[in-house]
Amino acid sequence: MQDCYGITPIDCGWENFIVSEPSDYLVFVFAVSADDLERITGGGDTRVAVIEQIGASGGNYRDVTFSVYITPQELDDHDALVAAVSEAIGF
């Protein structure tokens, strides 16, 4: 897998994230500075990205592992952390 630390995973090319077996974890939470968050998200509201996809029937791919980006301050904000992880898992 290509090292995509610090850039939006989609910029790395989806082919680098097709896996035959997904990670043991559904969501990875990355605490990044406000400046890095701005750079990673391009200033947008979306903080969730797909990091792994697995092949499904018919040549389609299914999203199986996600990343969510938050600031260190949000780690101390229970509601913000729950909201971010909930978004990542589709709640």
Image: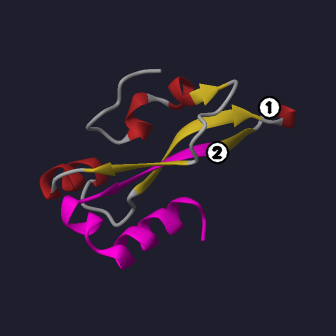
In-front residue for pair 60/82: 82
Amino acid type, mark 1: Gly
Q: Which residue is label 1 attached to?
A: 59
Total numbered labels: 2
Question: In percent of the image, x 47 and y 21: which residue is there?
Answer: 1
**Which segment did they paint magenta?**
64-91
Q: Is residue 33 magenta?
A: no
The local crowd at label 1, few if under 14, some if 14 to 19, many if 20 or more residues have their Cα within 10 Å, is: few
Residue marked by disc 2:
63
Residue 25 percent location from the top left of the image? 56, 43
10 with respect to 57 (left or right): left
Residue at (52, 68) in percent of width and height: 86
User: Do the residues bearing badges 2 and 1 touch, measured as CB atoms within 8 Å?
Assistant: no
Viewer-proximal residue among 46 and 21: 21
Image position, residue 26 (x, y; %): 58, 47
Q: Is residue 45 above or below residue 28?
A: below
Secondary structure state at the residue bearing disc 1: helix
Q: Position of residue 18 (x, y in %)?
A: 61, 28
